């Protein structure tokens, strides 16, 4: 089954004032056991195109493998008040595999000029995905943006806490 996400789906997760310029930000190719994300290149204003993201209630780790393109996997862990406790970014390119721990949030960001194609080793029912805090705060603690032709980070003002950005 193929699901195409539209601009309206992504709007609640974008920076304030940013217009959704990419009509079909990403698609999902689902099977019973895995999921493939196909994230379109480009930007919505200064913010690089991304998936909506979610926090996982799945009891185990999830494996993400980049099949094509380049981008960033955002991972965030929140405290009990939904403030960011840890924030990590992992560079993605073809062949890179990343493990996301249970209870962490994740989002794929396409920073390249081609499609970003990423395989997740599991298909999660909606009961394992929590997006409420992301909708309330309009995304993760930082937005991935372009400034002067470079990839940069902009603080999301809906968070009181902005932890140091860890890289991998």
Image (cartoon, helix red, strand yellow):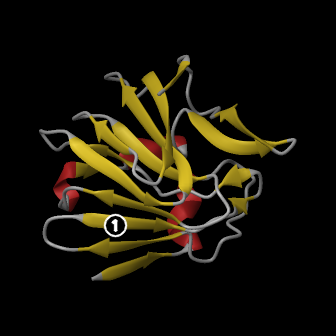
Quadrant assignment for the N terminus: bottom left
Q: Residue at x 13, y 71 (%)?
A: 32
Residue 90 horizontal side relative to residue 16, left or right:
left
Residue 27 place in picture, x, y as percent? 44, 73
Callout count = 1
In terms of image quadrants, where is residue 118? bottom left
Q: Residue at x 37, y 28 (%)?
A: 77
**Number of other residues with Cα within 10 Å of mark 1, as a class: few under 14, some 14 to 19, many 20 or more:** many
In terms of image quadrants, where is residue 121? bottom left
Is 40 located above or below residue 106 in the figure? below
Residue nearer the viewer, 112 or 158: 112
Q: Which residue is mark 1?
A: 36
Q: Residue at x 46, y 56 (%)?
A: 52
Residue 87 place in picture, x, y as percent? 47, 26
Residue 35 horizontal side relative to residue 140, left or right:
left
**Could you tell me which secondary element the residue under label 1 belongs to?**
strand
Residue 156 place in picture, x, y as percent? 62, 34
């Amino acid at each position: 089954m193929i699901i195409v996400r539209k601009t309206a789906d992504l709007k609640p997760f974008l920076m304030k004032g940013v217009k959704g310029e990419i009509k079909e930000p990403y698609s999902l190719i689902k099977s019973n056991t895995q999921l493939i994300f196909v994230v379109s290149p480009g930007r919505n204003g200064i913010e690089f195109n991304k998936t909506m993201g979610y926090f996982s209630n799945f009891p185990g780790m999830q494996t993400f493998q980049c099949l094509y393109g380049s981008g960033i996997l955002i991972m965030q862990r929140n405290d009990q008040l939904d403030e960011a406790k840890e924030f990590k970014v992992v560079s993605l390119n073809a062949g890179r595999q990343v493990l996301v721990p249970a209870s962490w949030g994740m989002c794929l960001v396409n920073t390249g000029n081609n499609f970003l194609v990423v395989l997740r080793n599991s298909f999660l029912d909606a009961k394992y995905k929590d997006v409420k805090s992301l909708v309330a705060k309009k995304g993760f603690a930082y937005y991935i943006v372009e400034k002067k032709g470079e990839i940069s980070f902009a603080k999301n003002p809906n968070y009181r806490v902005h932890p140091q950005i860890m890289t991998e």
